[in-house]
Image (cartoon, rainbow, N blue to C red):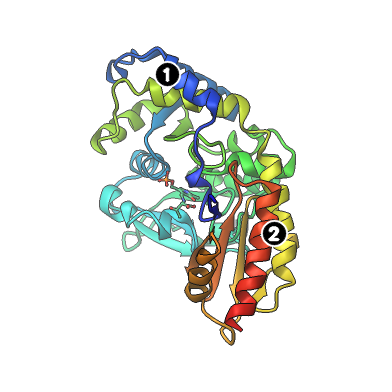
Amino acid sequence: MTAVDLRSDTVTRPTARMRRAMAEAEVGDDVYGEDPTINRLQELAAEMVGHESALFVPSGTMGNQAALMTHTDRGQEILLEEQSHIFLYEAGGAALLSGCQTRTLPGDKGRLAPEQVREAIRDENMHFPRTGLLCLENTHNRAGGTVLSADMTQNLVEVAHDAGIKVHLDGARVFNAACAQDVDVTKLTAPVDSVQFCLSKGLAAPVGSVIAGSAEFIQECMRARKVLGGAMRQAGVLAAAGVVALQEMTRRLEQDHENASRLAQAVAEMKPFSVDPDDVCTNIVAFDVDPEWFTAPEFLHSLRQRNVLANPVHQQRIRMVTHYQISSEDISDAVEAMHRTIGELK
Ligand code: TLP
C-alpha cells in the first residue's frame, strides 16, 4: 500500500505528459541562451505573471536568494514577516549571500499591515542600516497557506514604493493563492518588482522555479544565479515539465484546496487538535496539538505506522499538505488513521 504522503506538495511526481515532454524536449546550452525549451518556459512564465522577463532556476530557495542578491547592497536591511520562508528556512542566505540583516515584523496570519511596513522603513541617518527590500510571501507557508489579496498586495507595494523601496514576492505557491481567490495570478504578481514561484510544488514538475521581473533585473539575476552555481546547460529536459505544469496544472489546484478544507473540518473535530477550518483556504492544514495528549512527533510517529506521513512544524504543531498525488479517498483514509492513532495513544 502506498503511503498517504501529506509531508509537502514538494513530494509530487511528474505527470505522464510531463515525462513525455521531457523525453521529447529540444535542448541546447542554456549558458549560451540556446535551450529552446528553457526559453519557451521563461517567455510563458513571464507572460503568465505579468512581467517583462523570467529566469529558470533549480529551486525556490535559489530564486529567492538570487532576487535578494540582485535587489540589495551589502549592509542593508530586509523587511520580512517573522514566520517567512526566506527568514526561517533558507539557511541564513540573506546574511551569507547578500550581506544584509533581516528585520522581522509580526504578521496577522502571515499578513503584514501597510502601517507596520511604513513604520519599519528606516529614515536616512548614518547610524541606521538602509532599508533595502520588502519581502512578501503568498501563500504563506508557516501561517498555514493563508493568502494575500490583490488589494493587500497593492497597498503594501505602494507603501514601499513611496519610500523608494523594492518589493520581492516569495510566490512559491502563488498559483494556489490565485486559484483560492479566483483571480488572475497577475493581480498578485504584477504589482511587485520581482516574484519567485515554484514549478515543483503543487504544479507537480520534478524540478525548478522561476524568477520574474523587469528585463534589466532578470539580466542581473543571471549573474547571481551563476555565482550560486545554478546556471545549467541542457536543462530543457527539466523546463519541458515546467511548461506542462504552467499549461495544465494551475487550474486543478482547486481539488487540493477542497481536500485540505475537508481535512481541516475533520481535524477541527478531533479533541487533541485545534484549527479554524475557515483559515484553511489553500492546500496547507496546520494545527496545534494539545500538550496534555501528546507531542506532534509522538503522534506522527504512530500515524506513520498506519501509512500516513506528515511533518511537525514544532513540538506542538503539525502541518499536512494536499497535492496532486492525494485523492479524496486518501483524505478519508488519513482521517480514519488519525482517529485510530488518537485512540491508541489516549
Ligand atoms: N518549502 C518547503 C520546505 O522548505 C519548508 C515545504 O515543504 O513547504 N518559499 C516557500 C514559501 C516555500 O514553502 C519553499 C519550500 C521555498 C520557498 C523553497 O523552495 P525549494 O524547496 O524549491 O528551495
As drawn, is 285 to the left or to the right of 58? right
Looking at the image, can residue 310 be seen? yes
Secondary element at tag 2: helix
For label 2, the residue is: 263
Which badge, 2 or 1, comes first in the chain's sequence?
1
Residue 65: x and y in percent read: 36, 44
The picture quadrant where one finds residue 115 is: bottom right
Residue 78: x and y in percent read: 41, 54
The residue shown at (34%, 52%) is 94
Residue 102: x and y in percent read: 38, 59
Which labelled disc corresponds to residue 23? 1
Question: Label 2 amino acid?
Answer: Leu
Looking at the image, can residue 45 be seen? no
Secondary element at tag 1: helix
As drawn, is 257 to the left or to the right of 234? right
Ligand 1 is within 8 Å of the C-beta of the residue at disc 2: no
Q: Are marks 2 and 1 in contact (CB under 8 Å)?
A: no
Question: Label 1 amino acid?
Answer: Ala
Of 269 and 146, nearer the camera is: 269
Of 215 and 132, nearer the camera is: 215
Which residue extends farthest bottom?
Answer: 292
